[in-house]
Image (cartoon, rainbow, N blue to C red):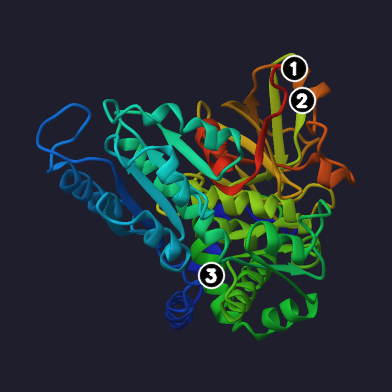
Amino acid sequence: MSDSLNRREFLGTAAAGSVLLAAHMAAAESAASAQALPLRLPPARIYKVFAGRIANQGYLSHPADEIARFNRYFAEIEKKLGDVAFVGGETIPPDSVDQIAANLKEKADALLIIHLSAHGGDAPVLSKLVDVGLPTVLFSQPFSGHGWMYFPQWHKEGKKVVLLPTSDWRELERVAGLLRAAAWMRQTRILAVDHPHGSAAACSPEQVKKRLGADLVVIPNAAVLDEFHAVDPKAAEAEAQNYWIRCATQIVEPTRPEIIDSARLFLGIKNLMIKQKAQAICSVHCMDTPRGCLTFSKLNDSGFVGACEGDIDSTFTLLLYDYAFHVPGFISDPVIDTAKNALVHFHCTSATKMDGPNGSRLPFRIRTQTDSNGGVALEVTHRVGQPVTCGKLVNLDTMLMVTGKIIETSRSPLACRTQFAQSVPDARRLFLNWGGGVIKGDVMTLLHRVVCYGDHGAAMHDLGDLMGFKVVEEGGAA
């Protein structure tokens, strides 16, 4: 007799339980939900400075109510995003640029300069603020003076600055999200179970702290197992029933006890992350029993990061997607198909809320892991036509990236459970230029990429400017 059940049989088995058991499970679920995942990081503090002459009339000056308009718009951004706070607000002149620069790092995580006009708002003066070294954005709309000609020099010198010569105020909201990412990374704590796996710089806690400001902490797998065994079995049963079994379109191979054990691992790792005050975790033990596929899926659904195979480079990539765009990523073992001009992604775990924690869930089936035909994994049906960004931050200093759209999904028995193909500009060039000449390492390090929903190509270049990494469009023009 087979141990596998379809969804109807699972639901029938669940319904056959007593009312008392159902009530106990509901209570266990409520108790589990009461202990939230690790707290979100505090709002990023963006220091705003208005630069230039302000007058009611005159050549290359702005009306006196312009600052009030900007401040109202900043208040709208704060309310909409919910995780940034605009501070400061001085005007240069009459305020002293030297006094502002002296205390900037203590007061803020990032800097936003609004270039209003000439005479006090040009490059020689503002360089004192840019040179403080905070991630900086300069917004200079048309008719804001002639100083804009000098601003590109900062970019050429490698300053952490994004320049916005535009009349589109919506760009201010977009870059606020990017400034949030740079600020949060410096406050992030990442757990690597037993050891991280990936590029040399990314595996070094010292390099991670120096380059990104984050804390990389190695913990023993025994700590994970202790938390796993400490979880109330009834709480695990409620978690399995309510988040996985009840919502799956089908359960193909795994048994109900296997799914409950996987849910128990999630609750254990969640409790561990709470105790450690961590925002991310990666594990080289994800193929152990129980497997980590459901755990990492729900962490990524919830706005935190769980990465398989101890892949620390992909962990940082997932964090950047989450912090900058509020979407999770899918760690992929890709292959290239020149016949379809496509990059085909597949792996045995995937977030189900690819639009972000507040989005709806994608359809999924609960399967075994392909290589071993054991454990519990996910087959998630991704959205055809969806723009995507595929990337990987390597050595903490280079983001490999290619954008496109999902053109089809598949269920090949030769590949891991979740499968979809992404269009690319030139599949053959991507094949020949795989790794962009910057990845050296084993199969996992060279192979893995991380896919997220949305075309974030331009934003990724800006994020690289703010955080000090270069962006290589993998498979792009030679």
Residue under label 2: 336
In the image, what residue occupies the spot 51% across and 45% down?
A: 354
Quarter occupied by the N terminus: bottom right
Residue type, mark 1 in image: Ala
Give neighbour class at mark 1: few <14, some 14-19, many 20+ (Cα, 10 Å): few
Query: Which callout, 3 or 1, points at the residue further toward the start of the chain?
Result: 3
> Is disc 2 in contact with disc 3, using a CB cutoff of under 8 Å?
no
Give neighbour class at mark 3: few <14, some 14-19, many 20+ (Cα, 10 Å): many
Residue 478 circle label:
1
Judge by depth and name the residue closer to the eye, 259 or 424: 424
In the image, what residue occupies the spot 69% across and 61% down?
A: 210
Query: Residues under labels 2 and 1: Cα distance?
Result: 19 Å
Q: Position of residue 90 (x, y in %)?
A: 27, 56
Query: Residues under labels 3 and 1: Cα distance?
Result: 50 Å
Q: Position of residue 282 (x, y in %)?
A: 71, 62
**What is the secondary structure assignment of the residue under circle 3?**
helix
Foreground mark, 2 or 3, reads 2
